[in-house]
Amino acid sequence: MAALRYAGLDDTDSEDELPPGWEERTTKDGWVYYANHTEEKTQWEHPKTGKRKRVAGDLPYGWEQETDENGQVFFVDHINKRTTYLDPRLAFTVDDNPTKPPTRQRYDSSTTAMDILQGRDFTGKVVVVTGANSGIGFETAKSFALHGAHVILACRNMARASEAVSRILEEWHKAKVEAMTLDLALLRSVQHFAEAFKAKNVALHVLVCNAAVFGLPWSLTKDGLETTFQVNHLGHFYLVQLLQDVLCHSAPARVVLVSSESHRFTDINDTSGNLDFSRLSPSQNDYWAMLAYNRSKLCNILFSNELHRRLSPRGVTSNAVHPGNVMYSSIHRSWWLWTLLFTLARPFTKSMVRGWLLAPCTPSAHLSGGPRGPPPCVATSCPPGLSLGVWSP
Ligand SMILES: NC(=O)c1ccc[n+]([C@@H]2O[C@H](COP(=O)([O-])OP(=O)(O)OC[C@H]3O[C@@H](n4cnc5c(N)ncnc54)[C@H](OP(=O)(O)O)[C@@H]3O)[C@@H](O)[C@H]2O)c1
């Protein structure tokens, strides 16, 4: 044996042959990973050659890729009427020769949510996105749904929400996506949403608090609070409170508060440095729309930080993110002047698909152009290593 090995002719006929107990598998996106059944772990690198691979080209004619109830990808050969967990393209893999990304920055302003989720499989994960019928929330919900997550669009207007659901299903008819009513301007509605969600008896792995209003004239909600403050901050605060136990039971889980860079241009303290509650929900005389928005976004960050401090020991993390400046969503619609400003700024700002709220958190596994994050687990109930939130000012 030693002589054979010395001569390069040991007992395997190919350097690619897997050691006993190992299995080659593919992700939905065609990345190859290796499952070690003895140690119950997976890795992207071939156990012998250390190379990363992906399958080349499309499935052969008559084949289709499906996902079973445990989230594992399998293949249906319609012509021969059989199914297999073995990707038929595994015979034709190509090496992935990753180059190290620049160490300082993994993503930039041209990165889209779909780029970030490339290679990830969220099958079995439940995601709630508030205000998901338009803008950044819609793109976020769609990206999760196209990567296998069960996504709930929590929206105040069911007609707009159903239309958003249809748009996602047009892109992938198997997407698991649904709409539920949530009006953040009405605490009773937040309560109803939480009750209806809990009645579904599903986990909650990601809660994206995205909905917001901007530049509104002063108004009070039915609960007697200034509308911007209630919709952007308090409604979400209450929602997280009500769903906290579900999040903790679903750990590892994550909350994302969509804030804004503009949180810097305000203050919620009085002249002696104490929190001034009257600034949070001001009277009509003390109201300036832009300031109200900025304050609500500052509240998002303060809330996120405190939530993270309290819940991270229980496996629920929280991040506040800034999605990008003055993106042309419908957020400016409350006043023609905002619409004009957003229109003028549009050529210089990011598109909606680039207003991503998602990022993987496994630096060791990241290589540009290659699969991101840890490979799927041997036991499919394992968390996929998701982390959301890229920027916490
Ligand atoms: N666009 C930017 O440049 C920018 C910059 C920094 C931060 N952000 C943040 O990004 C997030 C998304 O904004 P966007 O630009 O995508 O704006 P958008 O398209 O206007 O989306 C806002 C969403 O919030 C929903 N919403 C409003 N009031 C609600 C309520 N009472 N209850 C439930 N949902 C409600 C809206 O629903 P309807 O369609 O029914 O009104 C809409 O779906 C916001 O948190 C915003 O502060 C945006």
Image: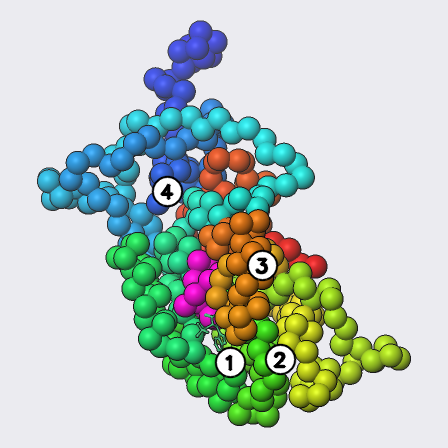
Whichever of callouts 1 and 4 sits on the residue coming sooner in the sequence is: 4
Image depth: mark 4 or mark 2 in front? 2
Of circles 1 and 4, the one toward us is 1
Residue farthest along the right direction in this orientation: 272
Which residues lie in the magenta part?
A: 126-140
In the picture, measured across the screen, residue 225 lies left or right of residue 250, that is right
Which residue is tagged 2? 229
State whether residue 318 appears in this view: no
For label 1, the residue is: 184
Which percent across, then down, holds residue 55?
Answer: 34, 32
Q: Which residue is mark 3?
A: 326
- Callout 4: few (<14), some (14-19), or many (20+) C-alpha neighbours within 10 Å? some
Spatial CA span between label 1 and label 2: 10 Å
Asked if residue 344 lies left or right of residue 310, the reply is left
Whichever of callouts 3 and 2 sits on the residue coming sooner in the sequence is 2
- Type of the residue with mark 3: Val
Q: Nearer the viewer, mark 3 or mark 2?
A: 3
Residue position for label 4: 29
For marks 4 and 3, give the CA distance.
Answer: 32 Å
Q: CA distance from mark 4 to mark 2?
A: 41 Å
Respond yes or no on whether mark 3 lies under 8 Å from ligand 1: yes
The secondary structure type at the circle numbered 3 is loop
> Callout 2, which amino acid?
Phe
Whether label 1 lies within 8 Å of ligand 1 gets the answer yes
Identify the amino acid type marked 4.
Asp
Q: In the rendered view of the protein, which quadrant contains the N terminus?
A: top left
Magenta stretch holds residue 251: no
Residue name at image x 48 percent, y 35 percent: 369
Q: How many marks?
A: 4
Q: Is residue 135 magenta?
A: yes
Q: Position of residue 242 (x, y in %)?
A: 53, 81
